[in-house]
Amino acid sequence: MQHPWGQAALANLVDLLVTLVEAAGAVVIFLGASVAFVQFVGAAIRGRHTVDFVPIRLGLGRFLTLGLEFQLAGDILRTAVAPTLREIAELAAIATIRTALNYFLNKEIQEARAELSGVADLTAPGRAAP
């Protein structure tokens, strides 16, 4: 059954939505990189770049993860209108790669949080450094 708007109009709407969602992902990644850069420069000027590096990486990792989610959403939208088998296969490959990237980013974020927690525990009052 044909969609009442027509296939071409629906495809144009989905193309617009894909562009908006992918642009949102790009903006999130750009903002995250910009914030991390400013924080890193500030830490370097204060001479604390080694101490402040982990929280900066954590923040950037969160932005990257969110940006990748937007990009994946755009890829899913792209295949929403009459996908071919090739488009489905490409989506599967892209989704696998982006999911793997997100997995490893999240794993690194968790490890960095644990590292930060360990540093906080060592510097807490009443704690002796090993």
Image: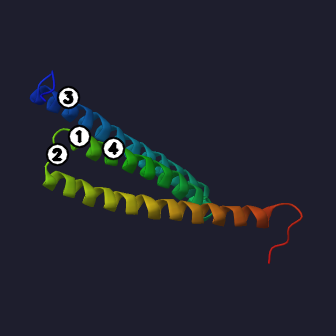
Q: Which labelled disc corresponds to residue 73?
A: 4
Q: Where is residue 127 in the image (x, y as percent from the top left)?
A: 86, 67
Q: Which element is circle 4 on?
A: helix
Question: Would you name the residue on which mark 1 appears?
Answer: 80
Question: The residue under label 3 is which amino acid type?
Answer: Leu
Task: Let me know if residue 62 appears in the view.
Answer: yes
Labelled pair 2, 4 in contact (Cβ < 8 Å): no
Determine the residue positioned at 52% across, 58% down. Answer: 57
Q: Which element is circle 1 on?
A: loop
Disc 1 packing (10 Å; few <14; some 14–19; many ≥20): few
Question: The residue under label 4 is which amino acid type?
Answer: Ala
Establish if 8 lies above or below 62: above
Determine the residue positioned at 27% across, 40% down. Answer: 77
Q: Which labelled disc corresponds to residue 91?
A: none
Question: Would you name the residue on which mark 2 appears?
Answer: 83
Image quadrant occupied by the C terminus: bottom right
Whichever of callouts 1 and 4 sits on the residue coming sooner in the sequence is: 4
Labelled pair 3, 2 in contact (Cβ < 8 Å): no
Q: Which of 97 and 86 is in front in this view?
A: 86
Whichever of callouts 3 and 2 sits on the residue coming sooner in the sequence is: 3
Labelled pair 1, 4 in contact (Cβ < 8 Å): no
Q: How far apart are marks 1 and 3 (CA)?
A: 11 Å
Q: Distance between the residues labelled 4 and 3?
A: 15 Å
Question: Would you name the residue on which mark 3 appears?
Answer: 13
Q: Is residue 61 left or right of residue 115?
A: left
Question: The residue under label 2 is which amino acid type?
Answer: Pro
Q: How far apart are marks 3 and 2 (CA)?
A: 15 Å
